[in-house]
């Protein structure tokens, strides 16, 4: 009840503010979820534009059928959850049409034949077949066919499985040598290998399912119809072949992957990611300050009910991981109450509720640090509780609270990186997407790390100045 109350409260505060920033979509604007990166079906090109077979097919079908759509690049597993929970109208993500999935999804006509294959490092001469995986670990991507297949043979061949959220991280796991192999759809492997990702295949591909566009079962029938008709038209007029050709016969990339080269080719994307990180932090901290103030005062209140509310709030948000809160707010709540919420709104709500709980504790600590005699003296002069709080206790409390506030500010800024799980293209997610394209994890994570460091150092310096001024 408390959470629902807080959400409504926050919703009414945030709602109008966000509504003005993001106008309500027209009736036929579908939200379509996709994978973070699944080249050549969906991936970012050098300019940060989302391209690939799925993306181009969708775009051409939308033109053919006259509908608008917004792509949400949330990752495969998240897309599955988001479509079934009603967050998105549909998904296109190199998604295999399987009998199991037909229980929860309605699929379009198949548009591409695929199948799972094992990938190992080009330099690995040890592994020649599944039997050589014994005692090793294998990387898979959550929720995929590749994961299902690997799991089905894991016992037989005696290997263990490690799951990752996106293909880029899964391949990274093999590249570092922590896992011996990855299981992935063969067209994706073939594309990566021509692009020079340093992998090879040694086994045949497994018979696999075809890809289809999907909507949640029993919903969005019109969208599904439009997709099918559009696909048929594209096949008839040659556009379908053209799109496939563009990607399946693409030349190897020749991008410069030195640090200066990476900065030159991705600084615009990185700055965009950094900007979103800052926006998320600033808005969330502002709301958290208010929440913290209110609930912190509740925590030290003489009224038992208020104290109970304050304690419950703090306990819930301090007692659960931020990631779980993000999933709960982004997927759980909209699914239960049957509405849609943007990842941005969900991100802000999660961060502010979370930081608010810690802020409440900071406020409580600050107030308790002020000698009891201060309040007593003030009250004995006939000044009311609230006024004593405001004029006598608070001014002293705030001084001790400032360092902790700055600390929380920095923590919240870093916590924004966790929101990449709900598909927000903040700085960390931006880094991941770029790595998915150029496979340069060391240099890219170094650049991303340095960016966080610089921005946090700058904020810390600024806050210290502010602190000095207030203390004067
Ligand atoms: N085709 C696979 C599946 O549907 C993988 C899709 C993906 O990783 N985007 O499970």
Image (spheres, grey):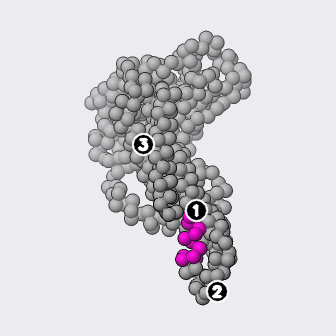
State whether label 2 is within 8 Å of ligand 1.
no
Q: Which mark is residue 380?
A: 2
Please say if 396 is above or below 251.
below
- Res 139 label: none
Query: Which residue position holds label 3?
Result: 273
Q: Earlier in the sequence, mark 1 or mark 3?
A: 3
Q: Nearer the viewer, residue 135 or 67?
A: 135
Residue 149's place in the image compared with 326, above or below, is above
- SS at mark 3 in the image: helix
Image location of residue 199, percent across then percent down? 52, 18
Q: Earlier in the sequence, mark 2 or mark 3?
A: 3
Q: Residue at x 33, y 52 (%)?
A: 28
- Asked which secondary structure carries label 1, the reply is helix
User: Residue 175 placed where, x, y %?
Assistant: 56, 23
The numbered disc on residue 401 is: 1
Q: Where residue 9 appears, x then y in whole percent? A: 50, 68
Residue lying at 47% horizontally and 55% vertically, measured from the top left: 465
Mark 2 or mark 1: whose residue is earlier in sequence: 2
Residue 399 part of the magenta-drawn span = yes
Q: Which residues are magenta?
A: 389-401
């Amino acid at each position: 009840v408390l959470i629902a109350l807080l959400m409504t409260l926050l919703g009414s505060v945030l709602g109008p503010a966000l509504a003005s920033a993001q106008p309500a979509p027209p009736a036929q604007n579908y939200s379509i979820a996709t994978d973070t990166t699944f080249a050549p079906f969906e991936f970012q090109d050098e300019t940060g534009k989302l391209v690939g077979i799925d993306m181009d097919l969708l775009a051409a079908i939308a033109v053919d059928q006259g509908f608008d759509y917004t792509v949400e690049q949330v990752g495969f597993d998240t897309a599955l959850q988001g479509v079934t929970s009603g967050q998105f109208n549909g998904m296109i993500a190199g998604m295999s049409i399987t009998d199991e999935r037909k229980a929860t999804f309605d699929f379009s006509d198949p548009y591409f034949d695929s199948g799972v294959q094992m990938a190992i490092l080009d330099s690995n001469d040890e592994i020649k077949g599944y039997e050589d995986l014994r005692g090793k670990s294998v990387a898979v991507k959550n929720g995929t066919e590749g994961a299902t297949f690997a799991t089905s043979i894991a016992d037989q061949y005696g290997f263990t499985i490690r799951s990752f959220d996106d293909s880029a991280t899964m391949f990274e796991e093999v590249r570092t040598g922590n896992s011996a192999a990855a299981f992935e759809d063969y067209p994706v492997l073939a594309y990566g290998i021509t692009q020079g990702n340093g992998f090879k295949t040694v086994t045949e591909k497994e018979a696999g399912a075809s890809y289809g566009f999907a909507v949640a079962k029993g919903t969005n029938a019109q969208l599904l119809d439009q997709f099918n008709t559009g696909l048929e038209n594209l096949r008839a007029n040659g556009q379908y072949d053209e799109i496939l050709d563009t990607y399946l016969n693409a030349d190897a990339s020749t991008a410069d992957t030195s640090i200066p080269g990476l900065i030159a080719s991705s600084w615009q994307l990185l700055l965009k990611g950094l900007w979103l990180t800052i926006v998320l932090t600033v808005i969330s901290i502002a709301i958290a300050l208010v929440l913290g103030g209110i609930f912190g005062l509740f925590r030290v209140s003489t009224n038992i009910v208020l104290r109970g509310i304050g304690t419950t709030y703090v306990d819930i948000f301090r007692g659960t991981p931020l990631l779980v809160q993000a999933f709960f707010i982004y997927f759980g709540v909209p699914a239960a109450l049957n509405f849609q919420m943007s990842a941005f709104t969900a991100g802000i709500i999660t961060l502010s509720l979370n930081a608010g709980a810690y802020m409440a504790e900071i406020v409580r600590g600050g107030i308790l640090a002020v000698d009891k005699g201060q309040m007593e003296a003030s009250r004995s002069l006939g000044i009311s509780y609230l006024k004593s709080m405001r004029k006598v206790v608070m001014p002293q409390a705030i001084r001790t609270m400032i360092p902790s506030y700055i600390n929380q500010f920095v923590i919240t800024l870093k916590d924004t990186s966790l929101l990449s799980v709900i598909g927000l293209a903040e700085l960390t997610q931006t880094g991941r997407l770029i790595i998915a394209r150029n496979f340069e994890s060391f240099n890219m994570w170094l650049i991303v790390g340095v960016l966080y460091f610089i921005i946090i150092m700058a904020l810390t310096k600024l806050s210290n100045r502010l602190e000095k001024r207030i203390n004067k």
